[in-house]
Amino acid sequence: MPLCLIPAPPEYGVALAREWVADAATASASSGAAGDLDALLLDASQPEELIGLLLAALRLNLPAVAVRQDNSTSVAFVALGVAPLEGDPAEVVLDVARSNGPGPTQLAGTFALANALRAGLSVGAGPELLVHLAALSREAGATGFSQMLRVLTPESPVVAGLNSEWFREYGAAGVLAHLGDALHSVPAVTGRLKSSLPEPPPDPGERGPRIVFARGRASGTEAVCRVAGNVSEISGECRVFGSEEDAVRAVSKEDLSSSFIVVGGYGPRGGPGLRRLDRLGEALEEAGIADSVTVMTDGLAPDGVGAGISLVTPEAVEDGVIGRLRDGDILKIDLNEERIKTRISAQELELREPYNGMIHSGHGYAARYARSALPGLEGAGFG
């Protein structure tokens, strides 16, 4: 029987929407109308919805099988062992229910999460995947994933885009077979993961963007940078906006090419709930300058820009440096040293008033979340 889920409000960011789905699914499956469920078949159109359903399965301790879709999250789910490499997911979930497992708690261990991270990044997933896997790790009680995430992510560039001919021919199974020895042998809904992999296909020959963690030595700032594989430095003059709407309007009126576009207030406690700057990405594409700009945010930078700097912490609403930047400030990110550098002294930053235009608050459920939300790389769930 289908669970009765109320869609998350459209203004919610991806982490808050995920928590909404998880809470709603848990409540629906626990209600008298749902009866005694033996397993869950997970299907959703958006990554945050799919992860939210898996969080609910963890909370309910119910075996779960995901319906595969051709997106980076579903590829990560195959590597996690939740989605079958082959066969009808509906038949697989019946087998799992009859055999009483393996359940999501058995599947969402640290090594399986590492597999999911490698596989998702290999087909183009961005920083959003890091947030959702960190949330799964926290819910499952998997130890050591936070440290593993910071080690494995820079080592996992894109090797085959979802729209490439290689992926259309070989699919998720080909991605996992290509990763081969880099994967851990872990339980899956149809047996051990690595035992069911095909022979490795030809090398895709594609090396796409990579993700690098960068830190500010004095300020304690951390950011997740997504850049082309051959880029060693990002630098530019800041153009600071208090909202995505302000940035979109400026794109249509000003020449922002080669700018360091800064938009704060969209992190977990801002946003509300960690928002993607998709409208800004569309505006930059329409203006023909997406490839030449850097977008920096405490939320999630849009795809397709020259460089995307996401999950800047501390975020603006927590008095982070991103809320004290001003137009004309020069930033440089050395990707080899993994350092954020600026010509602004720590004393000058300290004297600046935070830019209150970056604070975006919610009401009700969103306000309760904003009071306790964890940082992005800790899963951005309720603290």
Image (cartoon, rainbow, N blue to C red):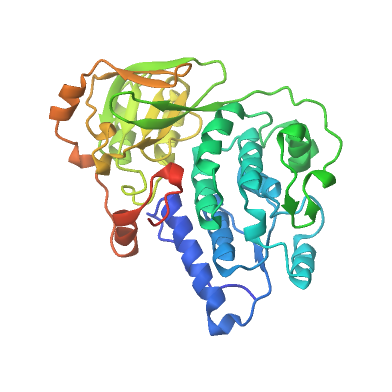
Residue at 24 percent of width and 45 percent of height? 359
- The outermost residue toward the bottom is 32
- In the visual, does 365 lie left or right of 100? left
- In the visual, does 146 lie left or right of 357? right
Residue at 33 percent of width and 31 percent of height? 221
- The outermost residue toward the right is 199
User: Residue 326 at what x, y percent from top left?
Assistant: 22, 26
* Snapshot quadrant of residue 256: top left
- In the visual, does 327 lie left or right of 292? left
- In the visual, does 56 lie left or right of 265? right
* Snapshot quadrant of residue 157: top right
User: Residue 241 at what x, y percent from top left?
Assistant: 27, 33
* Snapshot quadrant of residue 107: bottom right
Residue at 79 percent of width and 56 percent of height? 190
Asked whether residue 15 appears in the rendered view, the answer is yes
Compared to residue 269, the image places residue 303 above or below, namely above
- Number of callouts: 0
Q: Nearer the viewer, residue 236 or 27?
A: 27
Q: Nearer the viewer, residue 134 or 15?
A: 134
User: Residue 227 at what x, y percent from top left?
Assistant: 51, 24
User: Residue 358 at what x, y percent from top left?
Assistant: 25, 41
Asked whether residue 126 appears in the rendered view, the answer is no
Query: Which quarter of the figure is the C terminus placed in?
Result: bottom left
Compared to residue 304, the image places residue 243 above or below, namely below
Query: Which quarter of the figure is the N terminus placed in?
Result: bottom right
